[in-house]
Image (tube, rainbow, N blue to C red):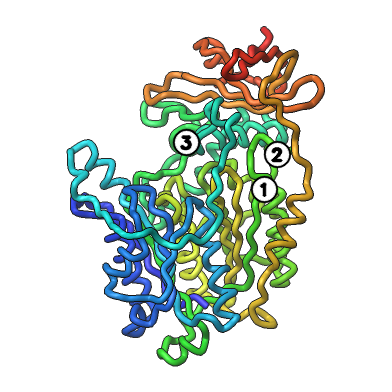
């Protein structure tokens, strides 16, 4: 069970601030939240979530030194926004099996300080560590293949817009209707952040503020404006303490503080984006959601609190659709405000979401909550259910191999690396620079025989502006390979 949670949002500038320092502060807060003393000294296993920068050679050991503890296990994670939730399931399995009775999960970033420090020549104050390197938990495969990389599919800001345009096509919206919908959709996330004292960006934003381009809201990867992108320039950290019930009783932790994991499921969609049959759907989230319901006995309509991973609007919509949540469902889809407004501290957002779910359940122990996490490009998925009462029949692990085999059985698209001939656009985006100028068109398309290709468009400003503002889904044209990459030229 979860017995302690700590969250830090350090908005005041401090040139001495380091990521590990913030993580240690959150860990101490989580230990204090247990309501008894001496918790940190009981930790048997510590996992520090991946820190984006600086490069720590052994962040878990550095964190242990900051906390003055010497746990028998020290783990690190690969990059992945799903890992906070993944770790709760991993440790719940081990605690239920009797192998552990007290663990710490912690992570955070000081990217706001680091970005200021880079400009002010303060990089020397950032924390460093030495050592042989930590033991790794989780899937650390490269997220993209060489064909995707050659065409500019290297970062979330370049890939999630492709999912969004595919969603627009499935929803039957034109670009104007879609932009309005996105503004209204994320305005509801912003409203939650406004009321959350731990959120990084709390100023109220209207739907128009979010949807429309302006000097303060440039286009990033069409159709996403800046206010729709995860906010990574934050100094935030969060930590969780988990224990067995027997350990919590021995330490005297009041049952009112206990929050129970009810079920957890993990799976990944076909690994490379270009191979997925439907770019608007996540079969892995559907499969994970079905396993959660079967294990817990709780259907999605019975969940009181929801936090769907929100690095970009497409991630939320795909999870909502996969879980069978209605577009008109009145429940907020975030308890924090989401990554665009609460803030997205690297790989650690899920830990904040779980901490907030704990707060809601502690306030009303008859309620429950669901947290979803996403790693890479709608690739890795981890979902968990939480409640104020123990799961009926005790904790039951969900077989990851059987779940993954079900997902893997889904169709994979044949991708042509050197494409030639008549073709149509399946989905697309236009990347913009910091001056709000279009600089690159990226297309996933289909040849006349149905095979898929990845391509760029000519860097013609008029064409890129048109692709940003007008309808280009299913636009036909021709694609050819220029010796290095595929180039798609639309007709007309």
Mark 2: give few (<14), some (14-19) or many (20+) Cα within 10 Å.
many
Q: Report, in whole angstroms, how far the alpha carbon at label 3 lies from the one at label 2.
A: 30 Å
Q: Say which of 267 and 236 sits in front.
A: 267
Do callouts 2 and 1 mark residues in contact (Cβ within 8 Å)? yes
Look at discs 3 and 2 and give the one toward the viewer: 2
Q: Report, in whole angstroms, how far the alpha carbon at label 3 lies from the one at label 1.
A: 30 Å
User: Does residue 372 appear to the left or right of 129 in the view shown?
Assistant: right
Mark 3: give few (<14), some (14-19) or many (20+) Cα within 10 Å.
many
Q: Secondary structure at mark 1?
A: loop
Residue position for label 3: 210
Mark closer to the chain start, 3 or 2: 3
- Residue 117 is situated, as x and y percent measured from the top left of the image, at 22, 42
Please determine whether, in this image, residue 467 is positioned above or below residue 335: above
Mark closer to the chain start, 3 or 1: 3
| Quadrant position of residue 76 | bottom left
Residue position for label 1: 269
Residue position for label 2: 276
> From the image, which quarter does the C terminus lie in?
top right
User: Does residue 465 appear to the left or right of 303 in the view shown?
Assistant: left
Q: Residue at x 75, y 56 (%)?
A: 405
Q: Report, in whole angstroms, how far the alpha carbon at label 2 lies from the one at label 1.
A: 8 Å
């Amino acid at each position: 069970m979860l017995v302690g949670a700590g969250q830090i949002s350090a908005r005041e500038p401090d040139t001495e601030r380091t990521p590990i320092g913030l993580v240690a502060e959150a860990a101490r807060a989580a230990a204090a939240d247990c309501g008894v003393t001496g918790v940190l000294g009981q930790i048997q296993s510590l996992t520090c979530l991946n820190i984006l920068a600086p490069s720590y050679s052994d962040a878990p050991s550095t964190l242990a030194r900051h906390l003055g503890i010497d746990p028998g296990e020290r783990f690190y994670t690969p990059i992945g926004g799903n890992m906070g939730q993944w770790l709760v399931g991993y440790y719940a399995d081990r605690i239920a099996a009797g192998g552990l009775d007290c663990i710490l999960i912690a992570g955070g970033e000081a990217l706001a300080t680091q970005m200021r420090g880079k400009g002010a020549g303060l990089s020397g104050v950032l924390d460093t560590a030495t050592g042989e390197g930590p033991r790794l938990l989780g899937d650390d495969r490269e997220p993209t293949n060489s064909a995707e990389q050659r065409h500019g599919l290297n970062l979330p800001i370049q890939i999630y817009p492709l999912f969004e345009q595919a969603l627009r096509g499935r929803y039957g919206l034109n670009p104007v209707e879609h932009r309005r919908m996105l503004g209204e959709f994320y305005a509801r996330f912003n409203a939650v952040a406004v009321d959350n004292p731990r959120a990084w960006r709390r100023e109220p934003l209207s739907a128009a503020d979010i949807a429309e381009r302006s000097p303060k809201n440039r286009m990033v990867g069409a159709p996403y404006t800046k206010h729709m992108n995860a906010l990574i320039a934050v100094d935030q950290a969060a930590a969780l303490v988990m224990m067995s019930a027997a350990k919590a009783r021995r330490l005297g932790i009041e049952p009112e503080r206990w929050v129970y994991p009810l079920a957890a499921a993990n799976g990944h969609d076909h690994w490379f984006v270009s191979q997925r049959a439907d770019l608007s759907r996540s079969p892995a989230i559907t499969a994970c959601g079905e396993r959660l319901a079967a294990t817990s006995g709780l259907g999605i309509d019975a969940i009181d609190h929801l936090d769907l991973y929100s690095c970009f609007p497409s991630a939320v919509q795909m999870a909502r659709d996969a879980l069978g949540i209605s577009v008109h469902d009145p429940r907020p889809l975030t308890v924090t405000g989401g990554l665009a407004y609460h803030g997205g501290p690297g790989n650690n957002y899920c830990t904040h979401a779980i901490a907030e779910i704990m707060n809601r359940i502690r306030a009303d122990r008859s309620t429950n909550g669901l947290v979803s996490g996403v790693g890479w490009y709608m690739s890795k998925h981890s979902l968990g259910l939480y409640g104020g009462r123990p799961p009926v029949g005790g904790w039951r692990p969900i077989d990851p191999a059987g779940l993954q085999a079900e997902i893997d059985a889904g169709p994979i698209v044949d991708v042509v690396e050197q494409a030639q001939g008549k073709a149509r656009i399946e989905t697309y985006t236009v990347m913009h620079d910091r001056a709000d100028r279009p600089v690159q068109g990226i297309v996933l398309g289909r040849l006349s025989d149905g095979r898929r290709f990845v391509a760029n468009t000519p860097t013609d400003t008029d064409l890129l502006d048109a692709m940003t503002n007008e309808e280009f889904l299913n636009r036909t044209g021709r694609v050819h390979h220029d010796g290095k990459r595929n180039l798609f030229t639309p007709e007309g």
